[in-house]
Amino acid sequence: MTKKLELYKCEICGNIAEIIMEGQGELVCCGEPMKLLTEQKNSTEISEKHMPEISDFKENHKKISVDKHPMLPDHYIEFIEVFSKNKNEHYLKYLLPDEKPEFIVPKSDNLLAREFCNIHGLWGNSFK
């Protein structure tokens, strides 16, 4: 069974799918089951460059940033995603290699931020 906002990746072609509505069954791409992506959380030098930071920004907004990560053509953050703990609010920003890895969203309690690095995968899981 899939759960809302889970991410799945095809190990063959690289497609990534996000679950909008929960359901039964298995996601398949290129004739093979897709792999469920989970947020990495380990405490290493790599994690310091990948963990999204959530901070207050202006009056009614939050800023999500991954300031320590490079944004080069061959190594960059592909997207930043933010959602509420109950998953009723959802924000997504795609990034290009030359863009600053940050995202401004409406202020809300209990936000989860995650980002996807084209080399090191999915990182996140910080509520604030």
Image: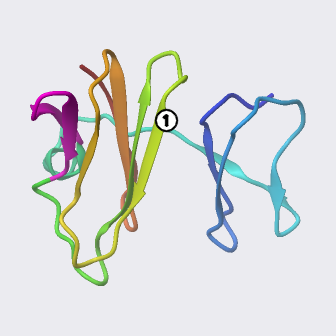
Quadrant into which the C terminus falls: top left
Residue nearest the viewer, comparing 15 with 98:
98
Figure check: 56 above or below 36: above
- Residue placed at 21% from the left, 33% from the top? 61
Q: Which residue is mark 1?
A: 90
Which amino acid, by three-letter code, is at mark 1?
Answer: His
SS assignment for the magenta stretch, majority: strand
- The quadrant in which residue 53 appears is top left
Residue nearest the viewer, comparing 86 with 108:
108
Question: Magenta residues, as a range?
Answer: 52-66
- Residue placed at 82% from the left, 69% from the top? 30
- Residue placed at 69% from the left, 28% from the top? 3
Residue 100 picture location, percent across and down: 18, 65
- The quadrant in which residue 5 appears is top right
Quadrant into which the N terminus falls: top right
Residue nearest the viewer, comparing 61 with 28:
61
Q: In the visual, does 70 lie left or right of 109?
A: left
Residue 42 picture location, percent across and down: 27, 35
Figure check: 34 above or below 114: below
Residue 105 picture location, percent across and down: 30, 39
Extreme residue toward the bottom, this view = 73
Q: Secondary structure at mark 1?
A: strand
- The quadrant in which residue 32 appears is bottom right
